[in-house]
């Protein structure tokens, strides 16, 4: 016997996230940041255990297929791509095109695009950068920021190529690195790059110590997706970025 049913006409706000196979951090951070009534739908893209420019570029071939794995019936207000360094290596416009080829959404963002948007909104022109990665990967990110008119005036790296070790870098080490890099008084803000870096929970400590905004990849991506989808004012406000217009 076929049972009768009704259909809910109200849809919650839904956002999509294409994150890396190797990422253990971004989903947790997003659930800490996003309003409880915003639904997060996640797909994964194959990624290498070792981070290099070659491995970052390799994700380009899989982005559309990974975006297609997001639910067909969803109404995605925006979709994020969860990789800062690959966004710099592949290019934000190319990332957006590949994701939109796989899923219907009006907006696509990534951590680099989000960082640039946050810097423009906050009047930030010089940042201190903390990277977990090797020089060639970090250099590509610095070039992307420079092209957007944002100078990296202070820099430090953990110089770690393995994702399984990046995610294990302690919060204390991240905090100390950000404070060390951010002590350069030419910095308007400090940015901790990498969606797998567990930086979110030390942002308030860093801001209290330095007196400038502390930004992380997951934080700025959630903020920017919130702006694009209209819910940024209801996010859990971890960091000064959520006060930017």
Image: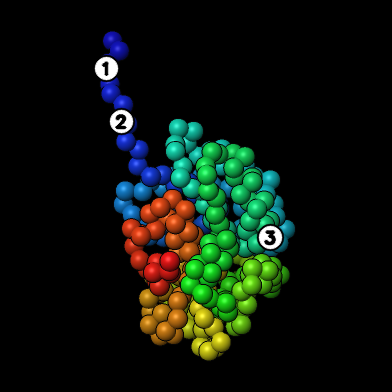
In this figure, which residue is indicated by the disc labeled 3? 89
Q: Element at badge 2?
A: loop
Image coords of residue 244 (percent x, y) = 43, 69
What is the distance, in whole Å, between disc 1 and disc 2 at their CAs? 14 Å
Q: Is residue 204 left or right of residue 224?
A: left
**Pointers 3 and 2 in contact (CB under 8 A)?**
no
In this figure, which residue is indicated by the disc labeled 2? 8
The answer, for residue 29, to whether it is visible in the render is yes
Q: What residue is rendered at 47% in x and 36% in y? A: 71
**Extreme-top residue of the structure:** 1
**Pointers 1 and 3 in contact (CB under 8 A)?**
no
Image coords of residue 179 (percent x, y) = 48, 84
In this figure, which residue is indicated by the disc labeled 1? 4
Q: What residue is rendered at 48% in x and 48% in y? A: 78
**Position of 180 relative to 53 (above/below):** below
Please tell me how crowded label 3 is: few (under 14), some (14-19), or many (20+) other residues with Cα within 10 Å: many
Which comes before the other along the chain, label 3 or label 2? 2
> Which-is-in-front pick, marks 3 and 2?
2
Q: Element at badge 3?
A: helix
Which comes before the other along the chain, label 1 or label 3? 1
């Amino acid at each position: 016997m076929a049972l009768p049913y009704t259909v809910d006409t109200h849809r919650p706000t839904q956002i999509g996230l294409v994150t890396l196979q190797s990422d253990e951090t971004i989903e947790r951070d997003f659930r800490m940041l996003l309003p409880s009534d915003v639904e997060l739908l996640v797909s994964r893209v194959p990624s290498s255990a070792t981070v290099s420019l070659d491995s970052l570029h390799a994700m380009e071939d899989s982005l559309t297929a990974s975006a297609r794995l997001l639910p067909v019936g969803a109404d995605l207000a925006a979709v994020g791509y969860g990789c800062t360094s690959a966004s710099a290596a592949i290019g934000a416009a190319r990332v957006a095109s590949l994701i939109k080829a796989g899923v219907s959404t009006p907006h696509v963002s990534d951590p680099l695009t989000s960082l640039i948007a946050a810097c423009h909104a906050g009047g930030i022109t010089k940042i201190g950068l903390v990277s977990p990665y090797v020089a060639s990967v970090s250099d590509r990110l610095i070039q992307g920021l420079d092209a957007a008119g944002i100078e990296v005036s202070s820099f430090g790296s953990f110089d770690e190529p393995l994702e399984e070790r990046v995610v294990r870098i302690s919060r204390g080490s991240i905090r100390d690195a950000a404070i060390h890099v951010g002590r350069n008084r030419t910095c308007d803000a400090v940015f901790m790059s990498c969606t797998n870096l567990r930086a979110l929970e030390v942002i308030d400590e860093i801001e209290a110590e330095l007196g400038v905004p502390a930004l992380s990849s997951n934080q700025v991506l959630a903020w920017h997706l919130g702006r694009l989808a209209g819910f940024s004012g209801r996010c859990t406000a971890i960091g000064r970025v959520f006060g930017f217009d």
